[in-house]
Image: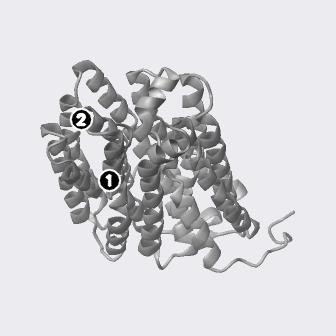
Amino acid sequence: MTEQTRPRVRAPGALLPLVALVLAAVNLRLAVTSVGPVLAEVRQGTGMSATVAGLLTSLPVVCFATVGFAAPRLARRFGPATVIAAGLALLTAGLAARAYVPGTALFVLLSGLALAGIALVNVLLPVIVKDRFPDRVGTMTGIYSVALNVGATAAAGATVPISAALGGDWRFGLASWALVAALAVPAWLLLARHRTPTPVVTGPVAPDVRIVRSPVAWALGAYFGLQATSAYVMIGWLPQIYRDAGLSAEKAGLLFAVTSFLGVPLGFLITSVAGRLRSQSALAVALGLCGAVGYAGLWASPAAAPWLWAVLLGVVNCAFPLALTMIPLRGRSPATVVRLSAFGQGVGYLIAIPGPILVGLLHEVSGGWRLPLGFMVVLMVPQLIAGFAAGRDRQV
């Protein structure tokens, strides 16, 4: 059936896309932030070594990098909403099953299944924003960044209490988040029924070589990768750093939740402001300086001012919504945004793969956290430089 003869379904208004956007965004970090607070219990229950735990913290960026590159092609064939619905279904299945499988290998494999689903959603949500809300890119990116951080905060802060309430078994706490993922699927199935050709998917697309040769695209990829390195080091290791400093599991989980919770008001504020600015370089540099001070504080003494370090690291975590806002702002046309999103996030997550693994290895070799935390302080320098370059008023 040709495009001309295919029956059209009247497109929904703004409410359904908005609800679907928020429901999807809530799930974008559940599979990741729920593990950190119970990592010690997961390692004990599955027989996981410290090196494999480091690999687990890098698994999100591996999946986001490799699977994310496939999202534009799948979106052109099936439609973005359909692919997002499928991604959320994969996430639901992975979250529900991984907590109950025996051994490390299956836990890692099913975590990868869940993260593959997130990878598809990651790349395509900026496309949905550009397509459905072209005049409110900053505001809508802020809304879904807030939703993302609400989900991340809830998973970080509530996994331990949920486990305790359900008999003290960490498996129940991890698996419970599959219910949240399942709730998001119907809205995207409804949105997929209204599939019509959109400029984002079917319009003129800049050739791949143009993206690859663009300094703007590479700056975005580098900034995305370096902020992701910092974020996933925090997600994978921050609760353990606090626990090793003598804090309880509950307090470590709350401190970790602070780093996500701050993204709720700050993420919305930063993206709203960034959408109105011609250049976002100053914002990127300010966030990087907060990260350098936060990691330096952890290096000096995690228990000396744990809430202050958590706040500063929560501020630098806002580099993620800032990077998401830059993607549609740097794309000259909607068709370019889908390629720029896949390239920036794909290359970025490839850059981020070694970071959490290296931090785990440095911790295992040194027997402490000063060496890996010193490495993170140094890593803030190239993040500052990349953020400054990515934020300049240039377009692909």
Q: What element carries label 1?
A: helix
- Dot 2 amino acid type: Gly
In this figure, which residue is indicated by the disc labeled 2? 246
Looking at the figure, which quarter contains the N terminus? bottom right
Q: What residue do we see at 80% from left, 74% from top? A: 8
Say which mark, if any, is on residue 144.
Answer: none
In this figure, which residue is indicated by the disc labeled 1? 259
The foreground one among 300 and 187 is 300
Q: Does residue 206 show up? A: no
Side of 149 where 108 appears, left or right: right
Looking at the figure, which quarter contains the C terminus? bottom left
Side of 155 where 219 appears, left or right: left
Asked which quadrant contains residue 270, the reply is bottom left
Image position of 288 with respect to 300: above or below:
below
Q: Is mark 2 on a helix, strand or loop?
A: loop
Q: What residue do we see at 15% from left, 44% from top? A: 297
- Dot 1 amino acid type: Thr
Q: What residue do we see at 63% from left, 59% from top? A: 184
Side of 129 where 94 appears, left or right: right
Disc 2 residue crowd, few under 14, some 14–19, many 20+, Cα 10 Å: few
Q: Number of callouts in the render? A: 2
Q: Where is residue 303 in the image (x, y as percent from the top left)?
A: 18, 41
Q: Position of residue 239 (x, y in %)?
A: 33, 40
Disc 1 residue crowd, few under 14, some 14–19, many 20+, Cα 10 Å: many
